[in-house]
Image (spheres, helix red, strand yellow):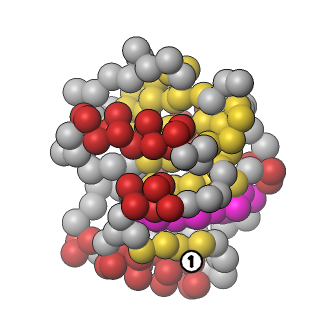
Amino acid sequence: MRIINGRYKNRRFNIPKNLNIRPTTDKAKESLFNILENMVNFNEIKTLDLFSGSGNISYEFFSRGSTVTSVDSNIKCIKFISDVSKNYGMDFSIIKKDVFNYLNSSKLKFDIVFADPPYNMPKNNYCKLIKLIFEKNIISNNGIIVIEHSSFLNFEKHEKFFKSKKYGDVNFSFLINKI
């Protein structure tokens, strides 16, 4: 895996098999950030990366100038993110906590919330996740929620749905907190 753009462009990191995760592919990540680049100024935003896994998305946001908070419940993932970020001199918040517990207790607001839950997470938990982000005011006015998901899920009927994009097996749904 590699960081595609920004201050840490072309830095590489190898994800150990024992993390047992499915990181966002470089192709899908590059396409995602091309979309976001036309929507936000990365230097001015706070980003929340939920179900962070390898930290792949957190590194990309941080490299582009965003303030980042990375949340995952897996201690191996947290250690990996911590090691990679220290190795590259990245300084962002890394939190070991269940995502739903984090959302319930957080008082922070973010301009972008990126969530990449396990693809086998039940659809009702995806809906619970989105509902919690809005109810707890985690997302700022005009903030963007990006959900990475399997092709079996569809969020087009959600009132805040903006658009979806598909890149191979990777699907992104964008919701905007228009006020």
| Residue 32, percent from left and from top | 54, 38
| Residue 168, percent from left and from top | 33, 32
Q: Which residue is mark 1?
A: 85
Q: Nearer the viewer, residue 153 or 101?
A: 101
Query: Is residue 71 within the magenta segment?
Result: yes
* Neighbours of disc 1 within 10 Å: few (<14), some (14-19), many (20+): some
| Residue 105, percent from left and from top | 50, 61
Q: Quadrant of residue 23?
A: bottom left
**Residue 25 appears in the picture as rendered:** no
Residue for point 48% across, 55% down: 103
Image height of 15 relative to 177, above or below? below
Image quadrant holding the N terminus, namely bottom left
Q: Nearer the viewer, residue 20 or 101?
A: 101
Residue for point 20% across, 40% down: 122
**Residue 155 appears in the picture as rendered:** yes
Q: Nearer the viewer, residue 163 or 56?
A: 163
Q: Name the outermost residue toward the top.
A: 157
Image height of 19 relative to 174, above or below? below
Query: Is residue 48 within the magenta segment?
Result: no
Left or right of residue 71: residue 58:
right
Q: Quadrant of residue 158?
A: top left
Where disc 1 sits, the SS reads helix
Instruction: Give the residues in magenta.
Output: 59-72
So how many labels did they put on this image? 1
Left or right of residue 66: residue 169:
left
Residue for point 39% across, 48% down: 116
Amino acid bearing label 1: Ser
| Residue 119, percent from left and from top | 24, 44
Q: Quadrant of residue 125?
A: top left
Residue for point 33% across, 22% down: 154
